[in-house]
Image (spheres, helix red, strand yellow):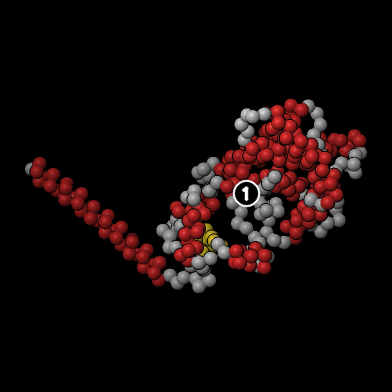
Amino acid sequence: MALITASFSNFKCVTYFILVLSMIWCIWLLVKKFYKNTPKSPHLPPGPKGLPFVGNLIPFLHLQRQNYFTTLSQTYGPIISLHLGYKLVIIISSPSVASEVLKDQDIIFANRDVSIAGKVGFYDGSDILWSPYGPEWSMLRRVCVQEMLSGPMLDSTYVLRQNEVRRMVKNLYVRGMSQVNVGEEIFMTMISLITNMLCGGRGGNEEENKSLVNGLGLIVNEMILLLGKPNISDFFPSLAYFDFQSIEKQMKRLVQKFENIFELMVNERTREDNEKNNTLHKKDFLQALLNIRDSRDAKTPLTMTHAKTLLMVFILTP
């Protein structure tokens, strides 16, 4: 009796196993038939066939991404289409085609798909890097070119740049023959320089200024890493709510730190203006943005959010 029961149990297991295999085989046939009968868009460039749902996402996440693109260009040509999850990406690997896209037809291809880290870090993408082409982007570009990066503005900050370079050279000289991380030294010098140009030179305690620069350097370094880190929620938007990699959470924490520093800078400048009425004498990025914000004659006004995003762009891209 026990032998019969065991045999029957084994028969049930084999039956379930065959049933599962049959279901998998049927699903595979349906998927294959669906993809075979689905007409391909004639407008898409050639590219490798990807897996269902994930597409070409797995090899794209490899560290040697440039080698992967080189191999694809040798097979499919200078224009390649990749399906990264639910995102369609077009890869350009030819200088002539890149010139056509970025120069001749730049208005058509100007808009960018904002990542989750970019939305959080740059106030829903309302900065010059992520804003769609239009009046708002034109206003931000005009502010950068005509106000923040104009000849008179750069001339007024020449002494600040000169002092920072001298400080770096002196610091390297004092170390003598000891090992120096040149990249880190230059990075911190640029952070210090940009901070000086934002607020017209920092006064006060030297240790406090050094602590501020070091703190900003750490924040900037973390934000750059988060902006360049592949986020699964960018490829599968339906998973953004769960924030599996905590990129959105980490970026919100860093943005809050930036907010505190910016609010401190703006409040300090407002207090100085009220006490000394020195608005016309201050020549720095922050004062230029505050002056433009206070002017009401522009068709597309510069808001405080725009000012924060521009300051953040200058700090993140030294």
Relative vertical location of residue 107 with respect to residue 18 in this rendering, above or below: below
Secondary-structure class at tag 1 = helix
Q: How many marks?
A: 1
User: In the image shown, does 147 or 130 lie closer to the viewer?
Assistant: 147
Of 273 and 91, the residue lying toward us: 91
Q: Which residue is at the front of the view, 92 or 235?
A: 92
- Residue plotted at (12% across, 47% down): 7
| Residue 86 visible | no
Residue in the picture at 40% in, 71% down: 37
Rendering quarter of residue 269: top right
Image point (68%, 59%), residue name: 132
Report which residue position mark 1 lands on: 118
Q: Where does the C terminus fall, quadrant-wise?
A: top right
Q: Which residue is rendered at x = 61% and y = 67% of the image?
A: 96
**Residue 57 percent location from the top left of the image:** 47, 54
User: In the image, residue 118 lies at what x, y percent?
Assistant: 62, 49
